[in-house]
Amino acid sequence: MSLDKTTIAKRYSKALFEIVSEKGQRDETRAELNQIQQVFNDNEGLGKILTDKGLEQNQKLEILNILTKDASNYVGNLIKMTFDYGRMDYLTAIIDEFNNLCDADEKIVRAKVVSAIPLSDQQLDKMAEQFAKRLKVSEVVLDSEVDDSIIGGAIIKTDSLIYDGSIQTQINQIRQRLIG
């Protein structure tokens, strides 16, 4: 039975998270992984290229050497291991999961706020502060999006929660009550 991408990403990231946390190198590792992820984001398809059979092995190794040249032992070993197992196209998912573990440990929640009009930095900061208190976490990091179809108010979405304070939803709820 082969494992899916999410399962593999969770296993690899958990192992790395535990090791670097124990060694007190989590922040450095996180920063390093985010730089690697940026390289993959800037070079779409890089993971697939390093996994596919279309590229010669020596060419793949040249790219791998560039990626691991300045890497710490832990990050270098992660990259080499994902390469050896033919899972380089999973690397960004592994990094995402690592960041999720860091956020959870630090009680940080990432959310998207959707509003009818652009929100100022001050409004976003206040909203993040209030939402953090409500969720009992240390910090909420908000990503803002504008959608004028909600008419007014805001919708805040996390991975597991949706707080909908939009005018459109309130209108729909009133409509449902009137209809019966």
Image (cartoon, helix red, strand yellow):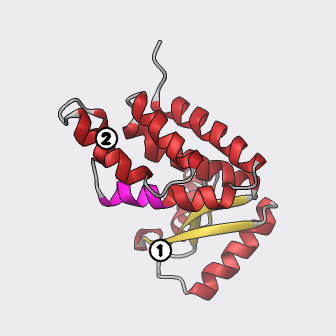
Q: Above or below — where is 115 with respect to 176?
A: below
N-terminal label among 1 and 2: 2
The residue closer to the viewer here, 115 or 126, is 126
State left or right for residue 52 relative to residue 89: left
Q: Are marks 1 and 2 in contact (CB under 8 Å)?
A: no
- Where residue 48 appears, as percent x and y from the top left, is 29, 39
Spot the residue most to the top: 1
SS for tag 2? helix
Q: Residue at x 69, y 81 (%)?
A: 126
- Where residue 158 appears, as percent x and y from the top left, is 61, 56
The amino acid on which the numbered mark 1 sits, given as a three-letter code, is Ile
Magenta part of the protein: which range?
35-42
- Where residue 27 appears, as percent x and y from the top left, is 66, 61
Residue 117 visible in the picture:
yes
Q: Above or below — where is 66 with respect to 6?
A: below
User: How far is mark 1 from mark 2, CA to CA?
Assistant: 53 Å
Disc 1: CA contacts within 10 A as few (<14), some (14-19) or many (>=20) = some
Question: Is 38 one of the magenta-colored residues?
Answer: yes
Q: Residue at x 47, y 12 (%)?
A: 1
Q: Residue at x 39, y 38 (%)?
A: 88
Q: Residue at x 60, y 32 (%)?
A: 11
Question: Is 9 one of the magenta-colored residues?
Answer: no
Most frequent secondary structure within the magenta stretch: helix
Mark number, residue 107: none
> Badge 1 is on which residue?
151
> Badge 2 is on which residue?
61
Disc 2: CA contacts within 10 A as few (<14), some (14-19) or many (>=20) = some
- Would you identify the image quadrant in which residue 42 lies? bottom left
The amino acid on which the numbered mark 2 sits, given as a three-letter code, is Leu
Residue 156 visible in the picture:
no
